[in-house]
Amino acid sequence: MTAAPSNSPLHLAVALDGAGWHPAAWRAPDARPSELFTPAYWADLATEAERGLLDFVTLEDGLGLQSSPFHRPDDRADQVRGSIDAVLLAALLAPLTERIGLVPTTNVTHTEPFHLAIGIATLDHAARGRAGWRPQIASRASDAAHFGRRTTPQLTDDDIRDPELIAKRLRPLFAEAADVVEVARRLWDSWEDDAEIRDAATGRFIDRDKLHHIDFEGPHFSVRGPSITPRPPQGQPLVASLAHASTPYEFAARACDLVFVTPHDRPGVERILAQVDDAVAATGRDLATRPLRRFADLIVLLDDSAASAADRKARLDDLAGAELASDAAVFTGTAAGLADLLLDWRPAGLDGFRLRPAALPHDLNAITRALVPELQRRGAFRTAYTATTLRGHLGLERPANRYARA
């Protein structure tokens, strides 16, 4: 495992979801539950994240209503249910922001690869090079009923107690997802950068020789191409995935530019990143030419004192009727304490962190107005944006077009 240099820039992102990642967050005194489906609410969150100079925000999405168990629906009415389309939301936020990356989640199991590819390419054009994409499989059998074209495995309560068992059951869906990403990447390259001529005098709008059929043939679908959308400003928008076990680590190693992992302590960081390294080796990926950025996820509750944060979490837990449980570690404390943790974990091999605010807007504001200044005082975080694209924020080069002649 390669440790992150101590003087390398620390990267920070936030995961935005509804009223926050605590199921009772919508009942907090400063929550805005009546605005969860309004443009103004999301614009305020995105512009606040940009105010804090964060690398990017991720936007959650799904094919069914949220549920307490991730693998099956429930009938609860005491938690937030419902969402708006993540890609369309990101497109709305694109002209309202200037530098921060926008990374929507999309389902790849029941959505056509061609539509996904042109949607993310269009977002990158709208955001002038700040788009990313988090492809996600549909692991709930109930989601398939919305489409009626196929079935997917029904996970049981026993299954979800073992991440490796889940990964084994869902391995075919991850293989299909890797093909979806490959199709998208080929479609993004199907227009060379200078394919558009737009010469009114000669009547040539495009150079047809610089548009390419991708001719993808796989076990799940075939796509001829080319795309209808010119190559995105970044060439290849950033592709990110969340991974908890061997199969998702392999998917990240094969298909993605960034992987989110969920350690619960410093030894956990080292153990998980060693598994990511194994996946990289198994797929034959050359990190020198195709770097894979590694972020750890944390749910955060931040206040001026650790006692205040603990009290707030206890109140939310009481409202929810259960203690907050998550795939990611839960940090409850002060900005200084969180900064200590981030800087302790980073040398184990992390490039950055994706923070999940437990309650919005409270914990997002604490990240941008308390954590970021604390990290800046320690010389660990930027004081201004130095790049204009999402790939640029993360130190990733713009890829060459695979179809362009040398």
Image (cartoon, helix red, strand yellow):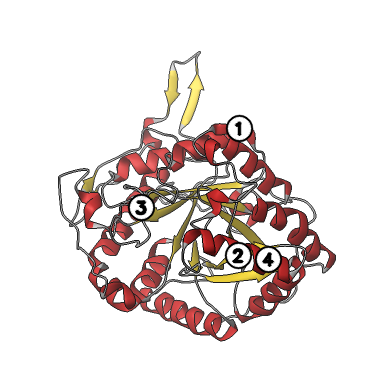
Is disc 3 placed on a helix, strand or loop? Answer: loop
Is disc 1 placed on a helix, strand or loop? Answer: helix
Q: Earlier in the sequence, mark 1 or mark 2?
A: 1
Instruction: Tell me: residue 271, above or below residue 26.
Output: below
Q: Depth check: 172 or 235 in front? A: 172
Residue 65 in the image, given as x and y percentages of width and height: 34, 48
Tell which residue pokes out farthest to the right in this image: 377
Q: Depth check: 157 or 318 in front? A: 318
Residue 265 in the image, given as x and y percentages of width and height: 57, 81
Q: Earlier in the sequence, mark 4 or mark 3?
A: 3
What residue is shown with label 1?
95
Q: Nearer the viewer, mark 3 or mark 1?
A: 3
Residues tagged 2 and 4 counted as in contact (Cβ below 8 A): yes
Q: Earlier in the sequence, mark 1 or mark 4?
A: 1
What residue is shown with label 4?
309
Residues tagged 3 and 1 counted as in contact (Cβ below 8 A): no
Quadrant location of residue 255? bottom left
Residue 390 in the image, given as x and y percentages of width and height: 60, 50
What residue is shown with label 3?
76
3D distance between C-alphas at marks 2 and 4: 6 Å
Residue 266 in sight: yes
Instruction: Tell me, for residue 313, which label it has, or none.
Output: 2
Local packing at callout 2 (Cα closer than 10 Å; few below 14, some 14-19, many 20+) is: many
Q: Earlier in the sequence, mark 3 or mark 1?
A: 3
Query: Mark 3: which amino acid?
Result: Arg
Query: Mark 1: which amino acid?
Result: Pro
Local packing at callout 3 (Cα closer than 10 Å; few below 14, some 14-19, many 20+) is: few
Q: Earlier in the sequence, mark 2 or mark 3?
A: 3
Q: Nearer the viewer, mark 1 or mark 4?
A: 4
Query: Mark 4: which amino acid?
Result: Ala
Instruction: Tell me, for residue 371, which label it has, or none.
Output: none
